[in-house]
């Protein structure tokens, strides 16, 4: 079943998406993952994480679903992930707006983006969900394409060594 991580990987790397969806998970001790975990823990101390089915939300308030990220480098992916959460909540009759909080490395400031699941965004999301289903159904992962993200990726050795 599609989850937030799979949605996030759609813009990051299709190979990674396929590997994760097929539960080929490698231990990732990269700095990015460690920062992500620390942010997650800080966040967890403030408001309890909310889980339903295979979805984990960082925070939920009366009006917003809040997702916290460590940088704005994958903002498209983070926004899509949040749209997906809004969509899944909407299917349960819960209507919320999304709030993406981006922390820059070594900075106290955070940038905030509001994400709204309107008709246009929902249609775009559904099209992407269809593409993701087709990708996952492939019998082998899409051929890896080297990008500047690869050296920090847990699958680097799997893909290129
Ligand atoms: S190493 Fe690169 S190509 Fe391989 S899964 Fe990671 S991001 Fe994708």
Image (spheres, helix red, strand yellow):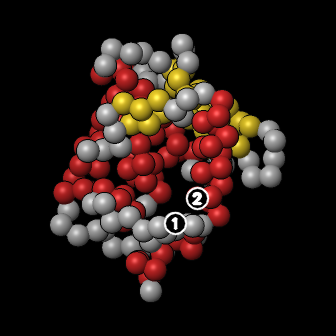
Q: Which mark is residue 33?
A: 2
> Is 23 on the left-hand or right-hand side of 97?
left
The reply to whether the C-beta atoms of the residues labelled 2 and 1 are less than 8 Å apart is yes
Q: Earlier in the sequence, mark 2 or mark 1?
A: 1
Residue 60 percent across, percent down from the top left: 53, 23
Answer few, some or many: residues within 10 Å of disc 2's Cα (few below 14, many 20 plus, some between 14 and 19): some
Which element is circle 1 on? loop
Residue at position x 56%, y 18% from top?
A: 61
Visible residue check, residue 147: no
Can you say which quadrant of the picture contains the N terminus? top left
> For residue 149, which quarter of the picture?
bottom right
Residue at position x 80%, y 39% from top?
A: 109
Residue 107 percent across, percent down from the top left: 81, 47
Residue 43 percent across, percent down from the top left: 64, 36
Residue situated in front as seen by the camera: 75 or 154 = 154
Residue situated in front as seen by the camera: 18 or 11 = 18
Q: Which mark is residue 28?
A: 1
């Amino acid at each position: 079943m599609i989850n937030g991580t799979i949605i996030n990987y759609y813009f990051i790397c299709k190979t990674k998406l396929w590997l994760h969806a097929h539960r080929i998970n490698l231990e990732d001790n990269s700095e990015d993952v460690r920062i992500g975990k620390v942010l997650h823990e800080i966040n967890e101390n403030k408001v309890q994480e909310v889980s339903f089915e295979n979805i984990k939300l960082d925070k939920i308030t009366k009006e917003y679903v809040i997702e916290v990220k460590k940088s704005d480098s994958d903002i498209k992916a983070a926004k899509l992930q949040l749209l997906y959460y809004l969509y899944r909540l909407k299917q349960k009759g819960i209507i919320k707006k999304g709030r993406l909080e981006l922390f820059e490395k070594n900075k106290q400031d955070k940038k905030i983006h509001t994400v709204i699941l309107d008709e246009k965004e929902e249609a775009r999301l559904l099209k992407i969900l269809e593409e993701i289903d087709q990708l996952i159904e492939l019998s082998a992962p899409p051929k890896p394409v080297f990008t500047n993200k690869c050296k920090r990726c847990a699958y680097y050795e799997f893909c290129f060594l």
